[in-house]
Structure formats: structure tokens, C-alpha cells
Image: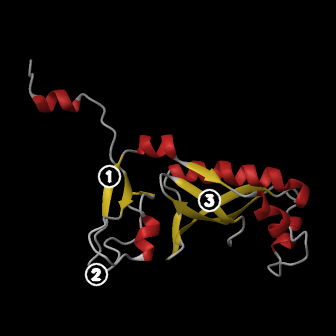
């Protein structure tokens, strides 16, 4: 019987470090506003903003386990992103998004359902690393997550991208319920 360390370790299940945490290191007096906004944010190891982000970037990518992402990740969608914004209940928006949702059989009375469904799918897909990086600026890193809901006027589902902002410790917040097809 072989009692080598490699045989022992091969019999253990080890969780991979397949996520990274962006860590801004304070090594100078100049701080990139984008790097400051990324500090503490979780990203799938193969789906993060370019690193190093700029010449002389002091940031590091710290490997973290998927279980830490699962334990800490959370999503937040403000109800106002649906009423008044998405369904344009105050008549101030010019985006026309309410027309699309109406064509799918949804109106402002469905705001709570849409909010909870976007939160549920957004969190599940973020934890799975199923997101696309979007624009990064001094306000933070945007991601898009594909959401699928029933089209109440047909036998088919519709899917669209919802736009989120990434925050430290696995938090994502909804920027827009509809960010495009």
C-alpha cells in the first residue's frame, strides 16, 4: 500500500480558487478612481476587468473560493427601478421600455414579481459566473446578466440583459431592469 502524500491529497476533494477579489493596495499618493471602486469586488477568475488596470497599478487579484462567493453574494434591486422608471408611471422617461414589457403582458402591477425574479436570476447567475463585463469608470464596474421571463402573450419566453453594478464582497445592485436584448 502506498502512503505517499500525493496519494493522500489526491483522495481529498479540494475546492478550486476559481474566483478573485480585487484588492487595491495603498502604495502611493495617487489613486486611480476605477481601482478604488473595484477594491473588494468579486469576479470569476476568468472574467474580471483587465489587470493590471493601468501602468503602475498596485492592485492585486486575491484568489478566493467559490464557497466564499456563495456565502457572501447578495443582490439588491430598488423598487423605483420598476415604478416609476421601467413602467414610466410619472411620464418623465423617454426610453419606451414600458411598451416592450406591455407587449410581453406585463404592467406596473407586476413590478414586485419582476423585481424578485430579476434579483433571483441575477444572484444565481452572478454566483455561477454567468455575466458579461460592461463599462468601467469612476462609478464602478457594470455587468450584464441575461434574464428570462415568460411572455404572457405567447407560449415562449423572452430574454434580455439586466444591468448591474458590482460592489465589494459579492454584492451586485440593479442599475436597469432592461439593458438591451
Answer with the quarter of the image where residue 93 lies.
Answer: bottom right
Residue found at x 51% / y 49%: 127
Circles 3 and 2 in contact, beta carbons < 8 Å: no
Residue found at x 83% / y 56%: 111
Circles 3 and 1 in contact, beta carbons < 8 Å: no
Q: Which residue is mark 3?
A: 173
| Colour theme | secondary structure
Q: Earlier in the sequence, mark 3 or mark 1?
A: 1
Answer with the quarter of the image where residue 150 lies.
Answer: bottom right
Q: Earlier in the sequence, mark 3 or mark 2?
A: 2
- Quarter of the figure with the N terminus: top left
> In 3D space, how far apart are the residues under numbered discs 3 and 1 (Cα atoms)?
23 Å
Residue 56 visible in the shown view: yes
On residue 158, the disc is: none
1 vs 2, front mark: 2
The x and y percentages for residue 45 are: 37, 57
The x and y percentages for residue 140 are: 52, 70
CA neighbours of label 2 inside 10 A, class few (<14), some (14 to 19), many (20+): few
The x and y percentages for residue 153 are: 89, 59
Residue found at x 31% / y 55%: 62
Q: Which residue is mark 1?
A: 63
CA neighbours of label 3 inside 10 A, class few (<14), some (14 to 19), many (20+): many
> 146 and 32: which one is in front?
32
On residue 55, the disc is: 2
Element under disc 2 = loop
Element under disc 3 = strand
Amino acid at each position: 500500500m502506498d502512503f505517499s502524500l500525493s496519494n493522500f491529497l489526491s483522495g481529498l476533494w479540494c475546492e478550486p480558487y476559481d474566483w478573485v477579489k480585487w484588492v487595491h493596495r495603498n502604495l502611493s499618493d495617487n489613486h486611480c478612481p476605477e481601482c478604488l471602486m473595484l477594491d473588494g469586488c468579486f469576479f470569476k477568475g476568468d472574467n474580471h476587468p483587465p489587470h493590471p488596470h493601468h501602468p503602475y497599478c498596485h492592485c492585486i487579484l486575491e484568489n478566493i473560493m467559490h464557497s466564499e462567493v456563495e456565502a457572501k453574494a447578495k443582490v439588491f434591486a430598488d423598487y423605483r427601478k420598476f415604478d416609476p422608471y421601467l413602467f414610466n408611471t410619472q411620464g418623465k422617461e423617454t426610453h419606451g421600455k414600458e411598451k416592450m414589457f406591455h407587449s410581453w403582458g406585463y404592467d406596473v402591477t407586476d413590478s414586485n414579481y419582476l423585481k424578485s425574479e430579476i434579483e433571483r436570476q441575477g444572484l444565481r447567475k452572478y454566483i455561477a459566473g454567468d455575466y458579461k463585463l460592461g463599462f468601467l469608470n469612476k462609478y464602478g464596474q457594470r455587468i450584464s446578466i441575461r434574464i428570462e421571463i415568460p411572455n404572457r402573450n405567447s407560449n415562449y419566453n423572452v430574454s434580455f440583459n439586466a444591468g448591474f453594478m458590482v460592489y465589494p464582497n459579492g454584492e451586485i445592485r440593479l442599475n436597469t431592469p432592461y439593458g438591451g436584448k
